[in-house]
Image: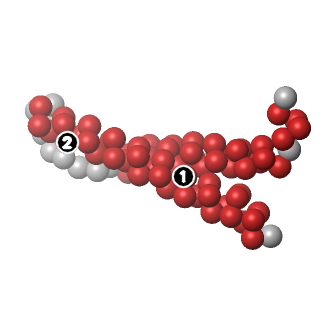
Amino acid sequence: MNDIIRDFLLKPSAAGMGGLAGFLTVILISKYLGLLVGTVKRWKIDISDVMLSLVGFVLLYLISFLKSLQKLHPEENN
């Protein structure tokens, strides 16, 4: 039971948090560079930036979850 929780909840959640952090970092860096170049007058974080970062969470969560699922049925992968 602990292996199932680890493989299908904890590992994918950790991967998803990494994806969220990665996407948010890229967004923040691009906004900051826009401020330095002068294309953006005011630096602020919108809810749309956070929502876009959730795409990174979902993507990496699903990738990790599906890899764990693939380990359950290795004979069907051929």
> Would you name the residue on which mark 1 appears?
16
| Local secondary structure at mark 1 | helix
For image coordinates 49% across by 55% down, the residue present is 17
Q: Is residue 14 visible to us here?
A: yes
Kind of residue at disc 1: Gly
Above or below residue 76? Residue 54 is: below
Q: Is residue 54 visible to us here?
A: no
> Would you name the residue on which mark 2 appears?
32
Q: Earlier in the sequence, mark 1 or mark 2?
A: 1
Percent position of residue 72, x then y: 83, 49
Kind of residue at disc 2: Tyr
For image coordinates 75% across by 65% down, the residue present is 3
Single out the mark in the foreground, 1 or 2: 1
For image coordinates 88% across by 36% down, the residue present is 76
| Local secondary structure at mark 2 | helix
Query: Does residue 17 appear to the left or right of 9 in the view shown?
Result: left
Query: Does residue 32 appear to the left or right of 22 in the view shown?
Result: left
